[in-house]
Structures are given as structure tokens and as C-alpha cells.
Amino acid sequence: MQVLKKGAFLFLLSAVAVVTACGSGNASGNENSDDVVAIVNGVEITRSVFEQQLEAQMQQYQAQGMQIDDEQRSQIEEQLLDQLIARELILQDGRDRGIAPSEEDVAAQLEQIKAQFPSEEAFEEALAQQNLTLEEIESDIAEQMVIEEILQGDVLSDTEVGEEAAREFYDDNPELFETPPQVRASHILVLTQNMDESEREEARNRIEDIRRRLDEGEDFAELAREYSEDGTAQDGGDLGFFSQGQMVPEFEEVAFDLDIGEMSDIVETQFGYHIIHKTDESDEGVQSFEEALPQIEQFLGQQEQQELFRNYIDELRDRADVEVLL
């Protein structure tokens, strides 16, 4: 049931995992008005922060083969600004309540993030590529812990979906449970966007070396975690299930043509060079209520949480002085 699949924006190193929240980086004080997109109770949200988060989102969409037109981009920008404002409102609420994580808790969370990298050097290299410092990461972690404590402890704590409500949703929306043929695949992506000829040749050499190592028996997921240049790397390149029309044509054609367990040759798309590993497939059909129940409960629960979240943010915003300058 593709419509009900959970969506999340994964920002490398920001530990963001809450409803509609984005990575932090709010700044105040010394920016010119031309460099500020919003002011929340005197705290400025800078254009550089906004554009950094926007670029991260656009890269996620592109790496998944999604094509974003101008209207969609405008909607994404509007939603992102709302999310950054909401984040600042929550952080200010946390400060007003005196909520602050301990240094030990922040350090423990930082170690969990580091553990996602093969080495300390790889972690430091990722920081350098993102133009981030360790202090900024620690600040992001502390802010995210404040947000999670407020939302999970107060705002979203009492949500429960009964089976009767789930059954009603299932009966009222039969079209959502019709499943087209789908495949599940993982990929390793070496980006080539905005590269000159020599850079593209270097990228081609890298993907060819990875393909050679796969032929020699190295693990696909491990190589994806180490070398794939998109947001799926931390999941071993797993893209989940997708149906026709969700990926760019060159990628999709190969993925659907592979046998389960088979790996592709190098596939070139507008994003770069891919190696595709088909891991599963499903035929067209209709999910039973029992099969769909966990997804329905998740979907309805998220709807309830989103409503509670919106109500909470609306209350904060009604009491706040928010100026939008974008």
C-alpha cells in the first residue's frame, strides 16, 4: 500500500526523527535583513540555514529518482520554512521550561552517530564535506533531544488507533489497498551531476572498481554503506519497494528486468552511475485487512499525531512574534 508508507527526511548527522522537524542551525543577531528568512521572537532564521536544509531535501529527492518541478519546489520551500519556524518555537518553549539534556546524554547520542561510520576518520571526513564542526553537531543533538522530550513526553504521548477505526478506514478506501506489481531493490550510487569530463571519468572508475569488488564476493550492503553517495547509504542502499513510474526510466527498466538476487551492470542516469541489486518483488493484488492493519494503524496514528503537533505549534505561534521575510 504505497500511499500509506511512512515518509521521513533523513539529514546526515542531525539526528532528526520527529514529525515534520528539520535540522537545526538557527542563528541570531548579526545578519543583515537580506540574509534572514524569518524572525521568531527576535531570533533570526538565516537564509544560509534555509538553503542548506533545502539542498539536503532536494538531494534526497534526486537520489531517489524523483523529479521536482517548480511548483513542487515552491511547496517544499514553504513547508521547510514552516518547519524551521516550528523548530525554533519548540526550542524556545524548551528553554522557557528549563529543559536541557546533560552533557553525558549528548555524548552518548554522538557516539551512536559515530557508530554509523566505518571509522573516526570517515566521520570527520563527513563533517568536513558538510562544512560542520563537532560543536555544531553537539548543539544539533542537544536541540533535538529537547524537541523529542517535549513532543514525545507531552504533545504526542497519548495517541492510539482502535481496530474499529482501522476497519472503517479500510472499508472506505478500497483503492488504497490495490497493489501494483512492485520490486524491491538496493543501489550503490556515485554522483556525476555538474561534473566535467575528467571528474566523470574518475566517477566511472570508482563505480567500476566497486562492481569488480562485488564480482569478487564482497557484500553489497557493506559497500553501499561505505561508497554510495545518497541518503540510502546508511541502510545499505535499500530503496524499499517501488512500482513503475516512481523512478527515472533508465533505473526502473533495469530494476524490473532483473531476477531476484541479481545485480546489474553499471547503469547511468541523470544523477550518476548506479549498481542495482534486486532483492524482492510482489505481484499485483489486494491487501487483506489483516495484512494492511499495521500500516493503517501507523497512518492513522501519524494523522492524529500531526493534528496534535499542529495544534501545539499553532498555540505557540499565536503567543509568539513571528515575522516571515522570505
Image (tube, rainbow, N blue to C red):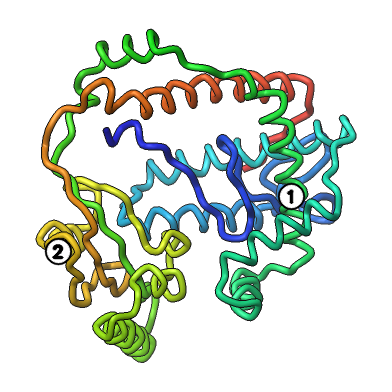
Q: In front: 298, or 190? A: 298
Lateral position of residue 78 relative to residue 115, left or right: left
Q: Quadrant of residue 3?
A: top left
Give how far across and how far down residue 205 sits, in percent: 32, 89
- Residue drawn at 38 percent across, 8 percent down: 164
Q: What kind of residue is marked 1?
A: Asn
> In the rendering, which numbered label is found on residue 279?
none
Q: Quadrant of residue 58?
A: bottom left
Q: Quadrant of the C terminus?
A: top right
Give how far across and how far down residue 152 sits, in percent: 67, 30
Give how far across and how far down residue 86 sits, in percent: 67, 34
**Image height of 304 relative to 95, above or below:** above
Residue, disc 2: 254
Residue, disc 1: 26
Q: In front: 126, or 235? A: 235
**Image height of 214 relative to 306, above or below:** below
- Residue drawn at 24 percent across, 67 percent down: 276
Q: In front: 216, or 206? A: 216
Q: Nearer the viewer, mark 1 or mark 2?
A: 2
Neighbours of disc 2 within 10 Å: few (<14), some (14-19), many (20+): some
Task: Decide which of tag 1 and tag 2 comes sooner along the chain.
Answer: 1
Q: What kind of residue is marked 2?
A: Val
- Residue drawn at 13 percent across, 56 percent down: 256
Quote the CA–CA distance across marks 1 and 2: 43 Å
Lateral position of residue 123 relative to residue 175, left or right: right
